[in-house]
Structures are given as C-alpha cells and as structure tokens.
Image (cartoon, rainbow, N blue to C red):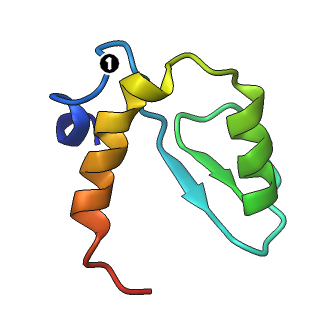
Amino acid sequence: MRKFIADFAPKDILVQPAVMVPGWFVESLGNYPVKAMNATYLVGYLTGSGRRFTEEQLRPILRRFDERCRDLEF
C-alpha cells in the first residue's frame, strides 16, 4: 500500500494494516502490528485517532483508490 500511494500521499502518512471481520466480535489481546477488528470497532478506531491531514492532502489518494477499484464487483 505504501508503494501504491507513495507518489500521491503526504510523506508522513501512516499505513496501518488491518483485517476486518464484519459481524463478528473481535477481542484484541495485545497491541500487534496488524489490527483485527469488526466494523463497529473500525469506526471508533478511525474517528478516535484524530485528523492529521486535510481533505486537500488526501484527495489524490482517494482519487487513486477510486481509479483502481472502479472495476471491482461485490
């Protein structure tokens, strides 16, 4: 992911690996480099971390994701 957004992201952006398990209760037993969480925890995790970048700084990254993911089907 770091390589994918390297040319578009602010240089000090943190890429945090995470595994989402929708609909499950996930108990965290430590502070591991890869986070495992459900959707409810994800919302708190993202909103509790505080905003470090402006929308203007993040817009190029979001555009890159949109271009890459536009052809995915769920």
Q: Which of 54 and 68 is in front in this view?
A: 54
Q: Is residue 74 visible?
A: yes
Number of labelled discs? 1
User: Which class describes the residues within 10 Å of circle 1: few (<14), some (14-19), or many (20+)?
Assistant: some
Q: In this view, does 44 lie above or below 52?
A: below
Q: Can residue 29 be seen in this view?
A: no
Position of the N terminus by quadrant: top left
Question: Is residue 73 left or right of 20 when viewed as pictured?
Answer: left
**x and y percentages locating residue 33 in the rendered image:** 53, 34
Q: Which residue is drawn at 29% across and 48% down?
A: 63
Quarter of the image holding residue 48? top right
**x and y percentages locating residue 45 in the rendered image:** 73, 38
**x and y percentages locating residue 56 in the rendered image:** 40, 25
Determine which residue is flagged by label 1.
10
Q: In this view, does 44 lie above or below 14?
A: below
Q: Which residue is drawn at 47% across and 43% down?
A: 17
Quarter of the image holding residue 67? bottom left
Q: Residue at x 22, y 62 (%)?
A: 68
**Identity of the residue furthest to the bottom in this view:** 74
Q: In this view, does 70 lie above or below 63?
A: below
